[in-house]
Amino acid sequence: MIEFYTPQKDLGTPESAEHEMVSLYIDGKSVEVKKGTSVMRAAAENGVKIPKLCATDSLESFGSCRMCLVEIEGKRGYPASCTTPVEAGMKVFTQTNKLESLRKNVMELYISDHPLDCLTCPTNGDCELQDTAGEVGLRSVRYGFEGENHLVADKDESNPYFTFDPSKCIVCSRCVRACEETQGTFALTIDGRGFDSKVSFGDADSFMESDCVSCGACVAACPTATLTENSIIDKGKPEHSVITTCAYCGVGCSFQAEMKGNEVIRMTPNKNGQANEGHACVKGRFAFGYATHKDRIINPMIRESIDLPWKQVSWEEATSFAASKLKLIQKNHGVGSIGAISSSRCTNEEVYLVQKMVRMGFGNNNIDTCARVCHSPTGFGLKTTLGESAGTQTFESVSKADVIIVMGANPTEAHPVFGSRLKRRLRQGAKLIVIDPRKIELVNAPHIKAEHHLPVRPGTNVTVLNSMAHVILTENLHSEDYILERCDQNEFNEWVSFISESRHSPEETESQSGVPADELRSAARLYANGGNGAIFYGLGVTEHSQGSTAVMAIANLAMLTGNLGREGVGVNPLRGQNNVQGSCDMGSFPHELPGYRHISIDESREIFETEWGVNLDSEPGLRIPNMFDSAIEGQFKGLYCQGEDIAQSDPNTQHVEMALKSLDCLIVQDIFLNETAKFAHVFLPGASFLEKDGTFTNAERRISRVRQAIPPLSGKADWEATLALANELGCDMSYDHPSEIMDEISRLTPTFNGVSYEKLDELGSIQWPCNETVPEGTPIMHVDTFVKGKGSFALTEYIASEEKANRRFPLLLTTGRILSQYNVGAQTRRTKNVSWHEEDTLEIHPHDAEDRGIRHGDWVGIKSRVGETVLHAKITSKVKPGVVYTTFHHPVSGANVITTDNSDWATNCPEYKVTAVQVSKVSAPSNWQIQQKKFDAKQKDFLSEAKV
Amino acid sequence: MRKLFIPNDTSAVAMGSNLVANRFEELIKNKSLDIQIIRNGSRGMFWLEPLVEFESDFKRFGFQSVDLSEVESILEFICDDSFDAALNKHPKFLGETESIEYFKKQQRLSFFRSGLGDPLCIDHYSSLEGFTGLKKALEMQPQQIVDEVKNSGLRGRGGAAFPTGIKWQTVLDTAHSKKYIVCNADEGDSGTFADRLLMESDPYQLIEGMIIAGLAVNANQGYIYLRSEYPFAHATLNTAISRCYAEGILGQNVLGKKICFELEVRLGAGAYICGEETSLLESLEGKRGLVRSKPPLPAIEGLFGCPTVVNNVLTLGAISTILCKGSDYYKNYGTGRSRGTLPVQLSGNIKRGGLIEIPFGISLREIVEDFGGGTFSGNPVKAIQVGGPLGAFVDRDKWDTPMDYEAFSAINSMIGHGGIVVFDDQINMFDQARFAMEFCAIESCGKCTPCRIGSTRGLEVLDKISSKKDVEDNLILLEELCDTMEHSSLCAMGGMTPFPVKSAVELYKEDFT
């Protein structure tokens, strides 16, 4: 999908939601369009172009520019085609002498207040005003240019990614409307009236001081050079573009990488992208500069010990060095002494290849994925109750929801494009229930107010969910017919007697969860009675000792109220990374083959054994935490870690570092020398998403193509590096293109049977299952029956975490993400996104701060049972008393120095979200931070020596 | 006890009626006279204000333009037991108020109570057929009420003259759990004051009309969007509304029935454009007053996206008459498709300015010459602007055109809200054209380009003409600009600003060259 660069097609007004068709005549030609379509869109859909400036198909029609006037037989005057809906039999004329003169005269007015610097203008050749002036044939401006004007208005260059030049503004309000309708932030407005009308930032003086979240929707919407990406100002117009998929969060936005040769000039959200429909966030839209950051390592490196400098070598030498090390380890310590960790940031094909290499080349099942530490409880919980380890809906489905529960997720920060969709629905009147220890933005945002915020104490999610189910059942608000038809009755009956026990009543659980009983009761009633109920949850549900229990409790609630199997409802995990869903689907778990088939099942194994020509071990392998423990015990000696920074992202850093130091051979494949690579013996340079072909699967099970925009800087895409290593290990694998890997996946995996690159090109994306029965994929799951047949109500007993607050550690620390940064920050810290978040801080409630004599900005030590780190304090009542909060985007913050080894009972997903801590004022960094600084400096020296 | 009536509306107060009232009160107290002062509304004969009246033999007698120095003599005059109207011995004595030609020639349907008594006295209102229409409406089905309004031929008095019954029918037919009645009381046209007079002199009439509208379309919330420049009307309406709540006329049980109607006043923020119904709705929603595109019509998606009746004060005022006396009675007045009466507001350089309620059909000349008595200055009339600041100047050949929506439309003019402003021969019509453009430049909401930029460029072009710069070319440019604004603006603000400009240029070319 490499195309010459042309601006994306704009049909002027949004698509009509109606199905009925209407016939009309446009310039004498009979056309048929959906009822409710604007005359402008009807014309555009049929190849008739009507000049326009304020209309764009991502926004509701506005009718301000008056360029799109038409004549309609039998109608008075010259109606604006953007705001006039079609009517049956209507006769529209888009080009008449009168229209020509009106349009030319309106354009003359525009240009009388516009600089005549087209040739030196940043959007020369990509400007709707310029194009339209050309279309209407404007040749002179009779008003002259000495009248009142805005030509000397000052530029606002405060945003690092784009410039606002009001001298070029035509006051079409597209930016203001995009900020409202598309993004939902309401940062922009028009100030003044008449000729003085101008775009303003509310009370703020500049973009950066305003509420702007730098999503770029305004920039995309601007028809002139008023809002322009700085990269366009610097480099000019792109010449070709490649459609690909964002590599940040699990929303999986489709982008057009706009290129000049091998340089990405701009990332523009793809209007046809089914996950994002033309919207983006500050990360995907602007923060791609890391791909060419000077810290990128593009040569393979090896060393015998982590106390030695690196040596740059060829790919052949590196993979042969790595393979011989691994073979030697296995020879000395047994087949099970090595393993691999795949990455949710890599493509499906790459993850598949890593697990294949482990099973085929390592001869064991020691393959795990970083999804272990985020959404493994989702896989377990949803598979147990519904029969499939995946979210049930499309994102689009939220537009039909009436009551929305957001639990342990912060969509406006971590899944911003979905957050905007959600906000749009809430502005349309859907009700919101937020279950979260923190007052996240959705609790009270412009034109949005949560009906209920249940400020649950960290670690007690299950009690809240159980109480909600208790209320719904005991107040007889459940969907009896649905349960009778769809769910296993024995399991349900057993569950009824469990959940009806009075110990689950909100009055009983209130003291544990901190959620007021009456508030919880009203919330439960709202979810049960309010129409379509949809649940969206995130790591604030999964990353607990009871993560799997909470996921099952969520599924119980949805089944109990009949909220599964149609649009507008469902259970929807918001996946943290771009390919969490995919990496799980691809069998990179120690117990599961691709498609969630247990390794111990002979028939499943045989399918792969036949295809691969090897015998597979039927015993599940090691999970990540087991690998660490086993390494420290001396049994696990070699690890291949692709695209994952376990030293920063996994809990109890001291423990992880000790494990890494115990390894004889650590092979790290990454685009940067990440924290883990500092413990490595082999470094294989990774490729960014811009440098390779493949697919990502987002939180809606949507498989989207990743397309190579630039050649791999290191000469190899990640799948090629894995392939080279596998071949060195003696595996007989040969692929010329990732599409061949996908062909193999679809051959072997029933839910992927119908997937191919060809079909992906044709459909844009595919939501699995996709096979003969559903050749175009499955937007909504469990429509008539559950995947497992009858839905299973699970008994969700709450067993409190071992991690409890006490006198020594009286506060509970919980963690999360912020908008501008992504995960461990390896990418976003290497972009101008640091303008919004230079460091991680500790959020603490004013009462807790007062008790400890802590003032805003003080250095504070945060001490848990396992470690200590130091951050600046940020005093805020977003957190409630007793709870503190931080982000984990900077390595030096050491958020995981304090998190513990506690983990989910079923999946070992770490309990990141609950750590008992004490916070006190300090004056120096923690010991760990001092050590980390030294170690980091030493490793950086080793790296620079390699470069020389 | 004798009754003395001293008007308390904005115009009378501006002419000193409060000072006069205070003096009367003082003297009555000092002399221990048995006289009750009633602060009534105005009868709309503003050139006579302060018009002090007293009642005798159930007749009302007036003194015009009462000055503080005359208070004592008037008191003596009315306390004289040998009073005989026919003797007419006081210099300011007018005789029987309702015999004044200006008043007698009117057909007062909506303003018949105006000036008769204390506007806030519910008993007074009820004694003069007040709430009769509402009581009848409470016994009717919504469709029957809408049918009555349709049959009356009533058209929107705000300016657009859209048939009220059809608008109501649309709202009635649009299914929605919430509907609104919005009264447009943002009376911003220069030279108009009928809305204000009605709100200050007979506020219950408006409230009654709004409740009936609510019954007709199944709406139970009303808002009066009042311009902030009307503080007296604001206070009067608020008192009237709270008294209606206290009397059970508004609230959960209208007149004891299981019918709810809530009403409140919302103040505008000083923008002319908020008199345009869609920007009024935006403003009422708390947003910047910006014109919306139509469709959707407010009747289908109006306030907060709900079906909404937006009617002018006079339109809603007429409703009580229609329900009380029947639609046929109302329809009986008027001519052609313009039925009922039109409250004309006569101002500018005019001898007898004020409100004249007359049936449609009377000519412009009759209004200006017979009612108005010609110019205040005594000089010949040079120009007449009808329909507010966006109305055209009417060609002197067309002054015999009857006041009728269609007849005015036929002469490229409009009746609008019924404002008539008269200019004598001292006026320079270039200044008037410039004023029209400037008004648009100041009051444009800024949404559509022809109005936003066009009005400012229009001013600049006019200034070039006045400074004799390329006059011919600039006159052509002005004409084209007017044409562009007229045909491509989003709303009537930009669309009609060219009317006064173009008519001034056409009719008074000499002022432009």
Image (cartoon, rainbow, N blue to C red):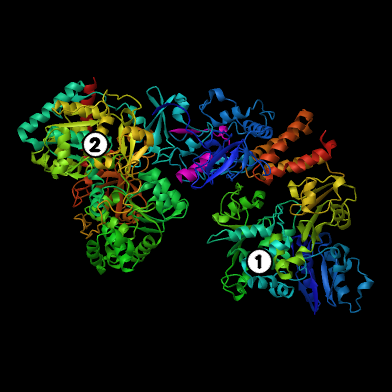
Q: From mark 2 to mark 1, how far is it between C-alphas?
A: 71 Å
Tag 2 residue: A747
Can you see residue A798? Answer: yes
Q: Nearer the viewer, residue B375 or B72?
A: B375
Classify residue B503 as left or right of residue A876.
Answer: right
In the rendering, at what x and y percent does residue A793 appear?
A: 25, 59
Please give the range of residues in magenta.
A161-184
Residue A658 counted in the magenta span: no
User: What kind of element bears circle 1?
Assistant: helix
User: Which residue reaches farthest left?
Assistant: A332
Q: Is residue B139 above or below residue B467?
A: below
Q: Nearer the viewer, residue B148 or B477?
A: B148
User: Mark 2: which amino acid?
Assistant: Arg
- Report the chain holding disc 1: B
Quadrant of the image containing the C terminus of chain A: top left
Label 2, residues with CA under 10 Å away: few <14, some 14-19, many ≥20: some
Circles 2 and 1: CB distance less than 8 Å? no
Classify residue A344 as left or right of residue B482.
Answer: left
Q: Is residue A211 above or below residue B201?
A: above
User: Mark 1: which amino acid?
Assistant: Ile
Classify residue A279 as left or right of residue B245.
Answer: left
Q: Nearer the viewer, residue B317 or A58?
A: A58
Quadrant of the image containing the N terminus of chain A: top left
- Report the chain holding disc 2: A
Tag 1 residue: B145
Label 1, residues with CA under 10 Å away: few <14, some 14-19, many ≥20: many
In the rendering, at what x and y percent does residue B71 appear?
A: 84, 68
Can you see residue A54? Answer: no
Which quadrant of the structure image shows residue A839? top left
